[in-house]
Structure formats: C-alpha cells, structure tokens
Amino acid sequence: MKKLLIFVAIIAMIAVPRVYAVPVSGEAVLDKMDATMKAERKYMEEEMVLVTASGAERSRAVAVWNKNVGEEEMMLVRFLGPANVKGTGFLMKNDEMWLYLPALGKVKRIAGSAKQGSFMGSDLSYEDMEALGSAGFSATHQVKAFKETKSEGTAVYQLDLVPLDPESSYSKLEILVHQELYLPLQIIYHGRDGLAMKKLTTFEHQQVDGRWVAGRLQMEDLKKGSKTVLKVNKVDFNPAVDDSVFSTRYLERGI
Amino acid sequence: MKIKVGKRWITLVISLLLPVGMGLKTTPAVAAGISGGEFSLTAEYRGEMKNSHPRPVYSLALKTQQAETGVGFYIDLNIGGDLRQLQPQLEIGEAYLDFSGENHELRIGRQRRAWGAALEINPTDNLNPPNPADPFGEKEPVIMVAGDYYLSNTHTLTGVIIPFHQPAVHKILLPAGLFEADPVVDDWTNTQYAVRISGKGVYGWDYALCYLRGFEALPFVKIKKTSTGPVPERIYFREYQVVGLDLATGLGGAGLWTEAAYFFPREGDQYYTAVAGGDYKFGTGLYLVGQLVFKKDRMQNKELLLQQALELPIAAIHSLRFGSLYNTETGGFMLRPEAEISVGDDASLTLAYRYVDGDLFTEMSEGNIKGNSFNVGLSYYF
C-alpha cells in the first residue's frame, strides 16, 4: 500500500504540472504565444528574399529596431543592402511614417495609406510586420475558435482570430501554434472577401536568450503566387538603444 | 564642377581607391577605399538628332566614405562622357568632412542640402543651384559650412554659411545674343547664410521655417528705358532674402503638404512660389501624387502649374512611373513615362521618354526644357 501511495504521488508530481501548463482557452494560448514573440524592445538583422511568381529572386538585407510599450508602437528599418537601396531608412511611430532616401538627402513624411500596402515591396504588409515584429496578436485580435490538433505529426493549437480593427486588411487569421514552443507554425490570412489571401510558415526554430524564435519565415501571396522569405540572422531582445533612436534625426544620421 | 581629364588622371584616382577597397594596407587618408558606386551605360536619343543613332553615354560614380565616433568624410567622383570619344570628364560631386556630437552635426565642404516638403519643385530649397540640364533633378553641390543642432528628438535648428556664390548658369540668351552675367564678387560681405528651424511629428505635423540671405542662382537683366526703347543695362545676380515655410501632415490615409517662399530682391520687385499637394498609396501598391504650383516669377508673370505623378510596382521588383506637368498660363506641358526593370539585385534597366510641348515656365531662364528625348540605361550598383 505504501509503495502504491508513493507511486501515485510520483505520478501526480509529474502529471499535475503538465495538466496546469496546458492552456484551457484560445486566449491563454494567444497570450503565451505573444509572451514568446513580443518584446518591449527588439533588434533584428534579416535577409529578405523576394521571389516573384515567375521565380526571379531579389535579396535585401535589413536591420529592424522595434519598440512596443503600451499604446506606443515604433519601428525603425535600415536597408543594409543591396547597393542601390543601402542607407534607405524607414521610421514608423504609431500612425506616422517617414522615409529617408539617401539620393534625396532628406526625410519625407509618407502617406498613412502606405500602411495598408506592402512592406518595402515584399509580401508582408506593415500590419504583418507589426504583429510579427513586436506588437503580437492578443491586443488586436479576438479568438473566435480554438482546438487542439496535429499538423504534420506535431501537436498544435489551432486558433481562428478576427482583427478588432475594422480597417484591417484581413477578415480572419487561422493560426497553428506549436504546443511546446508557443510559436506560430503557420498563419493563413483571409482577405475581406473571406478567401485565403496569404500564408505564413515558420522554420528553423531556435532558442535565443531563453526565448524560442523562428530562424526563417516565409510569406506566400496565394493570389499572386509570389513569396517573401525572411531569414533572421541576428535577434536581440534587449538592445542597448534608447527612445531617441525612434526619431527622424536617426533616419538621417544612422545609428 | 566638370574637368576634362586624361587617362592618367583617372588611372591615378582609381589606383588610389581600388587597392584599399580590396583590403590592402595603406595610409589612413585613403583607408576607406571605395565604399560604393554605380556604373551606367545609356543610349540617349533627342528629337533634333533626326536619323542619327542614339548617343552612347557612360558614367562611373565612385563613392568613398569613412566614419568613426565624432568624425567622418565623404567624397564622390563621377567619370563619364560620350563612349565613342573616350575623352572623359571628371566631376567632383560632394566632398565633405563631418563632425558630430550627441546633439549636433557640423558638415564642412562641397555638399547638397535639400529643403522642403513638396515634390521636385521646392520653393524653400535655394542653397544649391539647379542643374539647368535637369531642372527637376538633383541640384549642384556647393561649398558650405552647415550645422544642425538637435533641440530635441523632434526639433532641429540648422545654420548654413556659403562663402562663394555658385550660379546655375553664367550666361543668358537675349534677342541680341548670349550675354555673360557679372559674377558675384568674392568678398566676405557677399557671404550667403541661412537658418532653419524644423520639427517632425509635432502633434501630427512636420514643419519648417527658413530664412536665407544670398544671391539668385539665375542671372537678372536690369532694363534701362531709352528713347529707342528698353535696353539691357546690366546682367547680374541679384542679392535677395528669402523667407520660407513648409508643412506636411496626414489626413484619412493621404499625405498632404504645402510649401511657400517669398523672395525679396534688393533691387526690383518681390516674387513668390507656393506649392500644395498630396499623395495616396492604394493597397495594390499604386502610388499617386498630385501638386499645384502657384507662382509670381521674377518678371511678375503669374502662373499656375499642375503636376502629377504615379508609380505602379510590377511583380514586386519592377516599376512603371508616369509624371506630367502642365502650365495653365503658357499651355506648355511635359509627359514623362518611365519603366524600371530589375535585372538583378544590383542592376536595373531604365527606359524613359520625355515629351515637351511649349514653355513649361513663363520665365525662359527657369529651366524651360526643349525637345523630346528617349533614354535606355543599364545601371550596375556596387
């Protein structure tokens, strides 16, 4: 009997934390996913490869600084290559955006409508970059459906999200979240017409500073047939930069 | 600043820059090597060339720059000309030293400073003279000392001193022939200077206020009335003061701007230029710009110009552009369709056509482009 009690106690010690670790709702899954991906400050160096529907490839190297605290969303992007776009800078502070083109030699405010379009000619929009970069999904989306399932042999949570912003380009997001890493493995973005519009797939998951990150992301435009591959070469979740970096003076001066 | 040079000069320049660009040890003065550049081949056809082949033009731009904490330098050299003649011209573009601190920057040397929020026609941008061959393009660099003091993350105070006057053109075409204008005497009392205060992201607005005391970039013809009629008394560059303002903001997804400058010449009548415009980018990537230019020119003619531009990305890596300008006073207009085809990460092919009919401006000396042209250019960036 004593042996049986010890056996039950050991089983309980192993099993109970697992039971409590499993989120019981879609909202909890989304919060855990955001906790993994979101950062108040983040610095990334990425290679962005644009692949057209005909298979032509163009590569760009970018450095991206993000800040996301409370209502404040800021992003500074600097093009590191190729030579014809090197030095181009882009700053977004909430709804305001500025572009610095070295050939023009000045910072130019750009129309807010640009936020609805493609991010620097890629298949990602500014909205996608914000959510994936630092803002996360829980503050801007509502969970409409949640279930546990398997995707290619991996246990995942499947969530259907609806954007809270009526101006969003999407009507629904279908996300598959890895049950252990709490990273999105796949996101299918549905357009305002309800049809699948874009598909994001993440690869090469790895730990950086104790956090799981995707080393490679691929966004496919399901209508146009083009895709953009983002290869993350460097991530820093605590970059030593202050708020002044997110100002137009740094667009011109560089960091 | 164009200088005709022999092969020896070019060999010297390249031999100084190339080895260090390849990482070989050398003196600190040239330690930066070539940090980038562009080589382009262009076939240029102008309407007056009739049945001739397009003129083959080549251009090699070499940039070298180095910066370390607090100090840096930048130089760009352009070598180019007609590919058939191989008598290249060496043109020094910008060449300056930078000194920077936490809240300030000082740039000394030959440089460009671009001011204004409007598209291509910037009435507040009077520090650098326009290029008469391309009045809508990049302006000519001049020697200046320019300092920026960052009052905060949003506000900047700028001061500029230009010791030597550099006009856009030295000569002017009058009915009696081509006349050279009297140059501005190199005297410290003729030093040009400007100040500007600008703010970005101030309650949703970008703004700038500026003041310039200097000399006009284009010659002015002072007319003397005689019994036989008016005759040119003096052709010179007038001293003037300029007060300018520009504003930009966003409204309902559209970008909006206005820019205006009032010119106070020491002799003669005052004049002004005011611009108002907006832009919008659609979800498809189509980018539209529209602009109105209202001006009273130096001869006191009033004119209204309508300017438009659009850009449409094709398959994410190519783009089509179309620009137009129409002068309601003269009836003159210009159409500029252009296609840019990406042929690699570092190379692009550009096809551009320019159609001009009539006078684009009421004042003849103000960049009235004549004739139509077609250009095919292949550029490689490194």
Image (cartoon, rainbow, N blue to C red):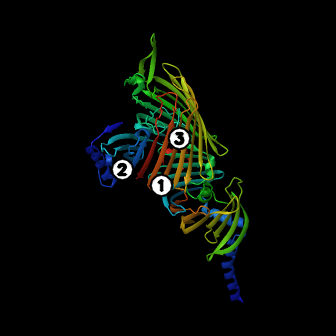
Residue B77 place in picture, x, y as percent: 36, 43
Q: Earlier in the sequence, mark 1 or mark 3?
A: 3
The circle on residue B115 is none
Q: Secondary structure at mark 1?
A: strand
Amino acid on which disc 2 is placed = Ile
Label 3 or label 2, whichever lies nearer to me, is: 3
Q: Quadrant of residue A53?
A: bottom right
Q: Secondary structure at mark 2?
A: loop
Is residue B50 depicted above or below B366 in this figure?
Answer: below
Q: Are marks 1 and 3 on the same chain?
A: yes
Amino acid on which disc 3 is placed = Leu
Q: Quadrant of residue B278?
A: top right
Extreme residue toward the right, this view? A144
Mark 1: give few (<14), some (14-19) or many (20+) Cα within 10 Å.
some
Residue A44 place in picture, x, y as percent: 52, 58
Mark 2: give few (<14), some (14-19) or many (20+) Cα within 10 Å.
many
Amino acid on which disc 1 is placed = Ser
Q: Earlier in the sequence, mark 1 or mark 2?
A: 2
Residue B205 showing in the rendered view: no
Q: Is residue B11 left or right of residue B316?
A: left
Residue B283 place in picture, x, y as percent: 63, 52
Residue under label 1 = B342
Dot 1: chain letter: B
At 30% from the left and 48% from the top, the residue drawn is B14
Q: Is residue A209 left or right of residue A112?
A: left
At 42% from the left and 46% from the top, the residue drawn is B69
Mark 1 and mark 3: Cα distance apart in space: 23 Å
Mark 3 and mark 2: Cα distance apart in space: 37 Å
